[in-house]
Image: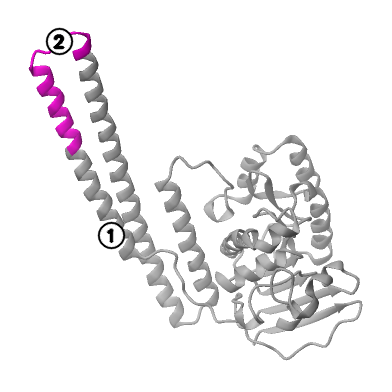
Amino acid sequence: MASAVAVGVPAPAPAPAPAATKAAQYSPSLDPAELRAAAQSCYRAQAAVGAEARATDGSRAALAATGFAGQSADLALARVGGYATTLRRRADTLHAMGDALDAAARAQESLDALARAALLVGQYRVILWLNQLSQQLDTELARELNRTRGRGMERLAECPQESLEALSARHMATLPASTRGTIKAAGGLVLEAGPGSTTVMVGSAENPARVITLVAGATTGNPRQLEGELEKAGRIAERTGAAVVVWQGYNPPPDLGAALSGAPASEGAGNLAAFQAALEERFPNAQKTVVAHSYGTLVATRAANRDGLLADDLWLLGSAGVDGESVADLTLAGPDAKVFVVDADRDPILGLRAGGAGGVGGNPPSNS
């Protein structure tokens, strides 16, 4: 049975009675029937637009057959031909969208079939992993349907076949020289990279027995703090023998006002859940530990509350508030997963937890 343990600093608080975390549930992001209906709509629209393109071609031919000539005629024929070309391109786009939707429907059906089998035998990890695959499928489908969207962060979950070394080398080539130097000095591997943030693993990545993911808060998650966070991760890796990840997969709130909105946590929660699922795929036998600090505790608990978080133990350090009313709202890797709450007596963040509630969510000790 999972337990929630409250720990005080310097003296640990008494451990409360064990509390079970929520059982994993399959909650796919996509519905195959809806995808197929959308695909059919695209195909019907493609047929209609294609018919318009052919009609426009016929109009151009009819105009040319009238004997109308001269500069005005040439301009008119070119304009009508341009309309036809635009319509054909639109029809091709609609057809491609239909194909993408149909392919996604087939892929989601496969995930649904696997989930049914996993539910029958109570495979918590597989169920959560399939949830993340469905979310990843949703993201990839959105990218395919919206080709003009700018490139954002490339997630670890999007590169399942690429070795960490090859992935890191590719990401390193996109980073500023100063950031590359910092990561090389720490002996790190870049797992994710994008505008303004970099996720790096230190310690041995060769079949680690444990992988610790550090989820930073509003200040420690700032990209300018990467060097200090890598130094901290290196010390943890040396003392524990674990592979340690400095995870910067979201944009921390720049101030308290932004933190109170909860929007950064919602963005980060989905990204963290997907990242942990990718770690599960690469290191299925390793113990997965998530250590969240300050605002990062809201990110981690929101992931566990909404999407499910593939973590065997979750540590909440100096929390300003968590998602959910109790540990029973959190879905972790299995029924034996544990949640630990760690507070320092003189931590100013405790001032945000007066009155039994956190500044941005529930009071962690009262949830334990």
Instruction: Kindly identify which numbered label has been placed on residue 289.
Output: none
Magenta portion: prevailing SS class: helix
Residue 364: x percent and y percent?
74, 77
Q: Which residues are magenta?
A: 52-73
Q: Residue type at mark 2?
A: Ala
Classify mark 1: helix, strand or loop: helix
Q: Residue furthest left?
A: 66
Q: Residue furthest top?
A: 70
Q: Tell me the residue at 74%/35% (across/down).
A: 177
Q: Tell me the residue at 50%/82% (across/down).
A: 122
Q: Tell me the residue at 30%/50% (across/down).
A: 98
Q: Is residue 261 left or right of residue 366?
A: left
Residue 242: x percent and y percent?
75, 64
Instruction: Kindly identify which numbered label has been placed on residue 69.
Output: 2
Check disc 1 and report the residue beneath it: 37
Image vertical order of residue 337 relative to residue 180, above or below: below
Image vertical order of residue 352 relative to residue 231, above or below: below
Classify mark 2: helix, strand or loop: loop
